[in-house]
Image (cartoon, rainbow, N blue to C red):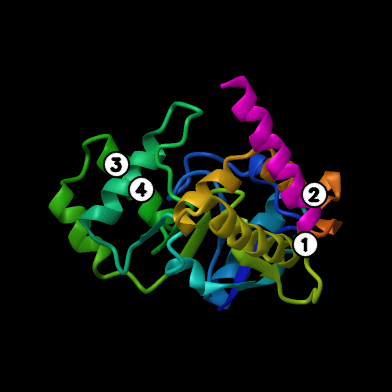
Amino acid sequence: MIVYHGSYTKITKIDLSKCEPRKDFGKGFYVTNILKQAEIWAERIGKKYNQRGVVTEFIFYENAFIDGIHKILRFDRYDEKWLDFVTLNRRLDSPIPAHDYDIVEGPVADDRISKEIDNYIAGKILRENFLNMLRREEPTHQICFCTADSLLMLELKDKSSDISYELSEIGEQILEQLVLNCNCSEEKAADIFYSSETFGKLADISTNFYKKSWQEIYEMLQLELKNEDKTD
């Protein structure tokens, strides 16, 4: 799937730490499959920074929805579950995320809807009336990538050797090797790898570990796991 991100500058590196909290689906990197929507985002954010808005195109590997590794939440339309989830994220006062999903997909709460959500949270509008209003809204779309793991499923469209592609290739090879060597399920292998310090270093682009072979990264992971066993 081709998806778009609207901003005041072209995106070449995604840094989740710079993403704002208390958005519809929480803190994360947002894209849409509706180009016009991304263009509106770009224009709006560009004006905020006195820049001309830019839309960056990405390839989203939709097998993330079915690979059994990523934790996914999807909303097909505006409904009560969507409203409750958005309200949960908008109300969040703690730096701890309100959920642990890797990827969340669903409709957008635009400016007008956001204002009504604030009124709903403040008790100024009845739940039933708000939901009836939402059902008359034009279709919108957004996908939020909430974790470093989820970003492996996103690749810059105009960069044939994108870093995310390299990370994805390394990850796939290591998971296969873990399943064989540890005699465990793919889910267990994913839990071991993505929670490891080795993966944290690999996902940190500044280390340039993505330029190493998957065998080198796997040796690092094995050493980390052996050291953990010694300290247990």
Q: Earlier in the sequence, mark 4 or mark 3?
A: 4
Does dot 1 land on a helix, a strand or a loop? helix
Of the residues shown, which amino acid type is indicated by label 3? Asn
Q: Earlier in the sequence, mark 2 or mark 1?
A: 1
Magenta span of residues: 215-232
Disc 3: which residue = 119
Q: Is residue 43 visible from the viewing direction of this image?
A: no
Residue in the foreground of this view, choosing between 48 and 157: 157
Q: Residue furthest top?
A: 231
Q: Earlier in the sequence, mark 4 or mark 2?
A: 4
Disc 4: which residue = 86
- The residue located at (80%, 77%) in the rendering is 160
Of the residues shown, which amino acid type is indicated by label 4? Val
Question: Is 3 one of the magenta-colored residues?
Answer: no
Does dot 3 land on a helix, a strand or a loop? helix
Q: Give percent across and percent down for residue 184.
A: 47, 53
Of the residues shown, which amino acid type is indicated by label 1? Ile
Disc 1: which residue = 163
Image vertical order of residue 64 relative to residue 112, above or below: below
Disc 2: which residue = 205
Of the residues shown, which amino acid type is indicated by label 2? Ile
- Whether pointer 2 and pointer 1 mark residues with C-beta atoms closer than 8 Å, the reply is yes
Near mark 4 (Cα within 10 A), the count class, few <14, some 14-19 or many ≥20, is many
Q: Earlier in the sequence, mark 2 or mark 3?
A: 3
Query: What is the spatial separation of the Cα atoms under label 3 and label 1, in whole angstroms?
Result: 43 Å
Which callout, 1 or 4, points to the residue nearer the camera?
1
Query: What is the spatial separation of the Cα atoms under label 4 and label 2, in whole angstroms?
Result: 31 Å
